[in-house]
Image: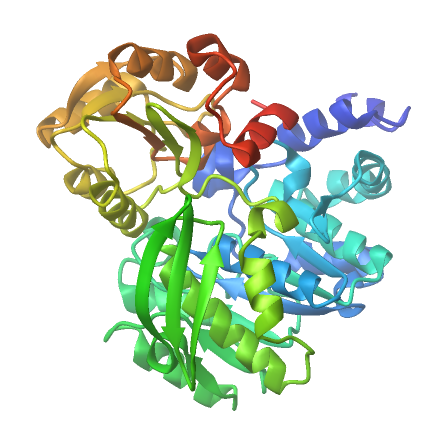
Amino acid sequence: MASLFIFLYNMNYQETIDYLFTRLPMFSRIGAAAYKKDLTNTVELCTFLGNPQKKFKSIHIAGTNGKGSVSHMLAAILQTAGYKTGLYTSPHLKDFRERIRVNGKMIAEKYVTDFTDTIRPLIEKTDPSFFEITVAMAFDYFAHEEVDIAVIETGLGGRLDSTNVIFPVLSVITNIGWDHMNMLGDTLEKIAFEKAGIIKEGVPVVIGEVLAETLPVFENAAKEKMTVLHIAEQNWQCLDSKWENHKLVVTVSNEQTETYQLDLPGIYQTRNLLTVLESSRVLEKEGWKINSDHFKTALSQVKKLTGLHGRWEIVRHSPLLVLDVAHNANGIEQLTEQIRQTKHKHLHIVLGMVKDKDIDHILRLLPKTAIYYFTKAQIPRALQEEELQKKAAIHQLKGNFYSNVNTALYAASLNAKKEDMIVVCGSIFVVGEISLKSIEAIWGKEDYTGDSLHFLDTLEFFS
């Protein structure tokens, strides 16, 4: 009867979101059970919609870390160059509509509801995953909006990812690291093979970083697909990087030397920048009208142009409060390096994780001198805060546990002095549950950075 009932009336936006979140298997909530290792459902959904993915040009981006930042930076560059640009990324931090944007503007609520009403009969028939539906929705929306190009970020892997029904003008793989091994493989070679599945016949491919184990995988895939392999870290060199006014200033060299100012201040963005510059250079050679001025303008305002948040997001300064979605070993390594280079007296870390990560590996990387506030996101996948505390103690990480991130943040605020630093990390879902009301209740309404305040104030988290 429940399935019959939903066809009796058109749902409003909140009902639609509730339906999508509860009716469909969702990886962020239940983990591997939601991951479907074939493209059958996506193909059927796209066929039903008239194959919208064939009606616009696209760039396909995969990788263990950095693919979200690279996607947003490339979208910002293309927008600045005058192209109507779609952007599909996942997961979202606060609002479902963050996943689907055109020129930085989120998909309209009405489009979400109308699309879902149209596709509901097929949902009931094929039982797709949440991700499969959102991919189909993005493709349909980009076709409807007649975008010039869409930047499409993969979900987990590449070869069997729902997004892998597109035939892009460029494929990009940022890097390979240890994450989702239960689904992608237990060696770097196996993980690289899955990511290399986005490489298409004759389509140029950019690899950001390679390892001894992964380079042969990419070389073989490019040879098999008869395409050209471009390796960013071999073609570009970072000469210098520094912080100025909470921005990252990076000087790079290729055929000539250029300096770029990024509004994404994480030092790990230097690696992503090289991937973006190499990708842009390849696009230029393919006939896209973009140049160095577009790069400089776009990279200085990626957050404003595309809505990217949660990457070394400085929310306030005294104490320094930073939000970062780092959640796997490679990401945490980069985060801890950033912490070491950031001036502070005492360090407070609000930490929450999900069950299916390599938790012990990550905990080994975290600084032992910090005071920890163990917590969890309000999703079934979350590792219980008391269990996280016990695991952390094995690695000499000490602190109390709290039932939600805002309570943990309040506890950190009671201990943190003006010259200290508080970092919230470990899961995108933990960062997504930070509440502006909680922050204002703790510190008042002063000393915030503008972009972060707007981000926290205007979006609503769906728990």
Estimate the x, y position of residue 80 in percent, counting from the top left. 68, 62
From the viewer's perspective, tell me whether residue 445 is left or right of residue 8.
left
Estimate the x, y position of residue 450 in percent, counting from the top left. 55, 32
Estimate the x, y position of residue 346 in percent, counting from the top left. 19, 26
Number of residue marks:
0
- Compare residues 53 and 342 and report the one nearer the observer: 342
Q: Could one spot residue 163 in this view of the protein? A: no
- Compare residues 194 and 306 and report the one nearer the observer: 306
The residue located at (68%, 84%) in the rendering is 287
Q: Is residue 154 above or below residue 207?
A: above
Work out which quarter of the rendered image holds the C terminus and state it: top right
Give the image quarter of residue 454. top right
From the viewer's perspective, tell me whether residue 213 is left or right of residue 117.
left
Q: Could one spot residue 203 in this view of the protein? A: yes
The residue located at (50%, 78%) in the rendering is 205
Task: Residue at the far front: name it.
Answer: 245
Work out which quarter of the rendered image holds the N terminus and state it: top right
Q: How is the image coloured?
A: rainbow
The residue located at (31%, 41%) in the rendering is 357
Give the image quarter of residue 210. bottom left
- Compare residues 165 and 401 and report the one nearer the observer: 401
Q: Is residue 232 above or below residue 45?
A: below
From the viewer's perspective, tell me whether residue 330 is left or right of residue 153.
left
Q: Is residue 274 above or below residue 411?
A: below
Estimate the x, y position of residue 64 in percent, counting from the top left. 39, 57
